Amino acid sequence: MIIISRVAETSKVKKSAQPINALIVVDVQNCFINGNLSLLKASAGQNGAEVILIINNLIRTIPFDVIVYTQDWHPWNHISFFENLHVRRQYLAGN
């Protein structure tokens, strides 16, 4: 999937003479570490908490110019929630 920034659509992008070092932390949430969506509960049995030590070490040891944290969000009726399994089945069936 390719996502194009809306900023790029509406603004002129200037080239930088200096490189910028960025750390982008994508979707690291408690629910994936020890919540109801914990990776430990998945078939691979990965420990989501391991990524926290790695992220903290990167932040401590590398002088990033910018650090960006992202988190997804879904409305209450999104098919990813357990309570909406019936909607997911309809969606996957093409209804």
Image (cartoon, grey):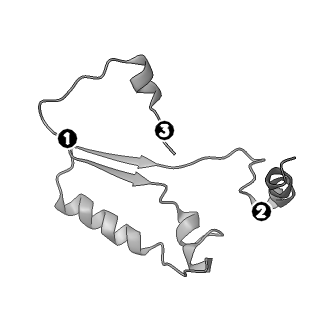
CB within 8 Å, label 2 to label 3: no
Amino acid at circle 3: Ile
Q: Quadrant of residue 83?
A: bottom right
Q: Residue furthest left?
A: 17
Q: Residue at x 87, y 58 (%)?
A: 86
* Depicted 92 relative to depicted 15: above or below: below
Horizontal arrangement in the rendering, residue 39 relative to residue 85 (left or right): left
For marks 3 and 1, the one nearer the N-term is 3
Amino acid at circle 2: Phe
Disc 3 to disc 1, how far (Cα)? 21 Å
Around disc 3, counting alpha carbons within 10 Å, would you say few (fewer than 14), some (14 to 19), or many (20 or more)? few
Label total for image: 3
Q: Residue at x 61, y 46 (%)?
A: 73
Kind of element beneath mark 3: loop
Q: Residue at x 56, y 73 (%)?
A: 39
Disc 2 to disc 3, how far (Cα)? 27 Å
Identify the residue under disc 2: 82
Identify the residue under disc 1: 20
Amino acid at circle 1: Ile
Residue 3 is labelled as: 3
Q: Quadrant of residue 15?
A: top left
For marks 2 and 3, the one nearer the N-term is 3
